[in-house]
Amino acid sequence: MTLSYHMTYERADRLQILEDTLGFTKIVLEVPVVNENKRYCLTSSGILIVKSLYDDFVITAFMVTVDQCYYICKLAGKGQIPPKLHKKIVKNIERHPELLYISH
């Protein structure tokens, strides 16, 4: 896996905070966005990892909101957010609202 300049230098602090607070867990949903040349990779801990469509190049990563997760699930053809993931995202926001301000 290769990290973008953005992740390596501009957001290295965010990467460390996400790892320390939420942890990078298993990817539960991966959605290609062909017209934007990227893939959304949603983890069971509620982190969205945005990768290149064609390789393992990580563009960015951040704690997802319920609305963002719903959008990604909709792109994947899912009717709704899986209940366990929804609960985890709500809990993340309650416990770590400061992480919402380090998105993108």
Image (cartoon, helix red, strand yellow):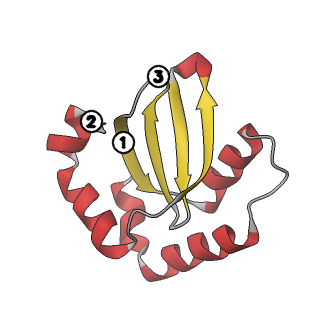
**What amino acid is labelled 1 in the image?**
Thr
Whichever of labels 2 and 3 marks the residue nearer the N terminus, that label is: 2
Q: Residue at x 43, y 35 (%)?
A: 51
Residue 64 coordinates in the image, percent (x, y): 52, 57
Q: Residue at x 42, y 62 (%)?
A: 100
Name the quadrant of the C terminus. top left
Camera sees residue 37: yes
Whichever of labels 2 and 1 marks the residue nearer the N terminus, that label is: 2
Give the Cα separation between the discs numbered 2 and 3. 12 Å
Give the Cα separation between the discs numbered 3 and 1. 15 Å
Whichever of labels 3 and 1 marks the residue nearer the N terminus, that label is: 3
Q: Which residue is mark 3?
A: 54
Judging depth in this view, the residue of 62 and 54 nearest the camera is 54
- Kindly identify which numbered label has been placed on residue 60: 1
From the viewer's perspective, tell me whether residue 59 is left or right of residue 87.
left
Considering the numbered disc 3 on the image, is that residue within a helix, a strand or a loop? loop
From the viewer's perspective, tell me whether residue 39 is left or right of residue 85.
left
**What amino acid is labelled 2 in the image?**
Thr
